Image (cartoon, rainbow, N blue to C red):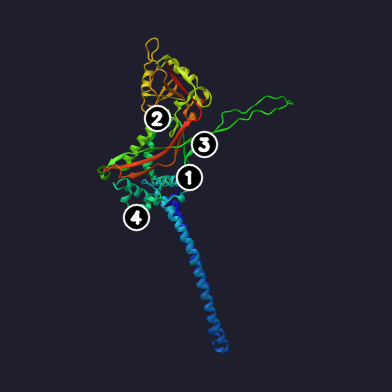
Amino acid sequence: MPEIKDVLDDVQREVKKFGEDVTGLKTSMEKDLKEVRDLAEKAGKNAGEGTQLKKDLEALTTGVTEKHAAIEAAVKKIQDESIKAAQDRMDELEKKLNRARLNGGGGGDDEFKQAREFAEIKSALHKTLKSGVRMPDDAVNVDEFKGYEAAFNRVISNRQGEDGLSPEERKDMSVGSDPDGGYLLVPKVSSRTMMIVRESSPLREIATIETISTSELEIPIDEDEAGASWAGETADRPKTDTPQVGKQTIVAHEMYAFPKATQKFVEDAGIDVGAWLGRKIGEKFGRTEATAFVAGNGVGKPRGFLTYASGTSRGQIEQVVSGAATAVTFDGLINLTAALKGFYKANANFLMKRTTVGAVMLLKDGNGQYLWRPNNQVGQPSLLLGYAVREAEDMVAVDAGTLSIAFGDFKAGYTIVDRMGISVLVDPYTAKPFVGYYTRRRVGGDVTNFEAIKLQKISA
């Protein structure tokens, strides 16, 4: 992004160029006028020659006329070419100066980033920008974004919704319309929402997350190995096996929240409706998706890793029994970690319910000493057998035959798909005196590497 110094340098160059143009014109005019004076002096010297004087005066008149016309043509050329070029450059400098001002502090840089994010999401949803491609600085219209943000805040902060907008505000809102209905959340509210979603969904901390602008993500699957063999110097080299590459599709399913507020709440000027909205929908989305990532059946929602059959083939997740009826055992935990290939252990985590964590904490050795003492440092996960423990309330409580503990490299094993953009439709009519905020986003998830995750099954 340009610095203010760069913009000032550009302005200085423009001023210098303009000065050079003026200097050139002045020099040309002085030369032309000198020629005219020379003609006049010659006419004066020949004043007594009669016929020659007439000829010289005619030449003087013609010369003055021609030189005057030449000067006018030169001036017009500068006006037509130089002034237009300067105007184009000044338009460009104005854009740079605007970005430089935004980059100069006071929250401007943050505003430019929001304008860029808004432009990228809008363009992606309208299929004019591919996911992962950055919007060029010159294509970011900060004024357009500021107009939309002001109109959006007006919509969510009045009890009339869109009906409370002026014609100019409606025009500003039109730039953020979602092709599937509603309007895009401004990046500030959207970011606050997603921050709360991440806090509510522990799998997001350890899984792979892909952001897309389409309805689904296609992932190539290559779990076969290429064939190889030894051969002597002159021995035949028969064809080796060729790996088969498949494809897995993860659909971004629609999820919605419909928080409501009283009209009095909305009209209260002291309430930040945007902050309230971001918090409410973030909490709802976070809890809803967290459940689906663990136990969702894949029908109209993400598929959870607990829903797959037991086994070691693709489409199955290995289940390791705990070794004791209706209880967690330390031996079972050791066997669970041993079932995971060493390749995945560097990024492995335990995932279990809070009550299951408590059950593991109560395990004792033959001398009555606790086998595990969790980390008490705030913000840091506890380590069990050298691996981080993440609490996930959607995991199943310990009971006979339940899958109560998951262990593995979830970044390799599970992929979450987020479709760009969150949209909202303000509804002040359906449930008066409440104002409803019908909010939609699309998210998918599924296991993509089945051998990277293992499950602990509590013995019956």
Quadrant for the C terminus in the image: top left
The amino acid pointed to by label 3 is Glu
Task: Single out the mark in the foreground, 1 or 2.
Answer: 2
Side (left or right) of 442 relative to 264:
right
Name the one closer to the observer, 98 or 181: 181
Q: Vertically, is 356 above or below 221?
A: above
- Tell me if mark 3 has few (under 14), some (14-19) or many (20+) residues whose alpha carbon lies within 10 angstroms of its own: few
Q: Name the mark on residue 218.
A: 3
- Tell me if mark 1 has few (under 14), some (14-19) or many (20+) residues whose alpha carbon lies within 10 angstroms of its own: few
Task: Single out the mark in the foreground, 3 or 1.
Answer: 3
Q: Name the mark on residue 291.
A: 2
Position in image of residue 315 (x %, y %) = 51, 27
Name the one closer to the observer, 317 or 73: 317
Position in image of residue 263 (x %, y %) = 26, 44
Direction right: furthest residue: 234
What residue sits right under mark 1 in the picture?
A: 134
Identified at 41% across, 52% down, the residue is 98
Q: Evaluate whether residue 78 shows in this view.
A: yes
Number of numbered discs overlaid on the protein picture? 4
Please tell me which of labels 3 and 2 falls first in the chain.
Answer: 3
